Amino acid sequence: MPTYFVNSSNMRLSKLIKEKLAKKITKIHNEATGANKFFAQIIFNNTKKGDHYMGGKRVSKPEIFIYGHIRSGRTTTIKNKLIKGLREVIKENTKLEKDNIWVYLLDLKPNQMIEYGKVLPKSGGEKKWFKNLPTKLKTRLNKIDN
């Protein structure tokens, strides 16, 4: 957790842009929340041309939507930092205007999620959660985090 779904419509993101966005989205989440980088997952999807509508009319301009599933318990200040940071990283790396970038954060209860085989901790409880993981998993996650 978090999982950020980046959906592009009427445009294709290159492999290089996806890699840049994945690193920058991870960094934004890490800096805003203090959560380890290994929690951040970024999944890219592309809507086929002609499959995007607004108000019942086909959209032809490029748009990007980010749906961030994050653990509940984050403050409004942290969430604002996240959504604005996510919007800016998309703007800087795609040249889209702000009105073509949509960002949504969805709060999920930590005790209703399992990652790396363990129920997730409440926000702020990452260190204790990590301490109780098996050594092999800790080694794996430390490689991702650095």
Image (cartoon, grey):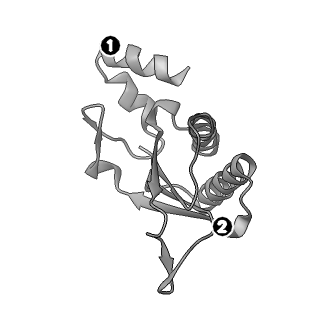
| Residue 42 position in % (x across, y down) | 48, 42
Instruction: Read off the residue under disc 2.
Output: 100
The amino acid type found where label 1 is placed reads Thr
Instruction: Read off the residue under disc 1.
Output: 135
User: In the image, which disc is placed on residue 92?
Assistant: none
| Residue 121 position in % (x across, y down) | 36, 41
Q: Is residue 88 left or right of residue 55?
A: right
| Of 126 and 29, the residue lying toward us | 29
| Of 139 and 77, the residue lying toward us | 139
Q: Is residue 117 left or right of residue 129?
A: left
Q: Residues within 10 Å of mark 1 (few under 14, many from 20)?
A: few
At x 52%, y 32%, the residue is 37
Does 109 sit above or below residue 52?
Answer: above
Q: Quadrant where the C terminus lies?
A: top right
Outermost front residue: 50
Q: Secondary structure at mark 1?
A: helix
| Residue 25 position in % (x across, y down) | 59, 43
* Label 2 – label 1 distance at C-alpha: 44 Å
The amino acid type found where label 2 is placed reads Asn
At x 74%, y 63%, the residue is 97
Q: Quadrant where the N terminus lies?
A: top left
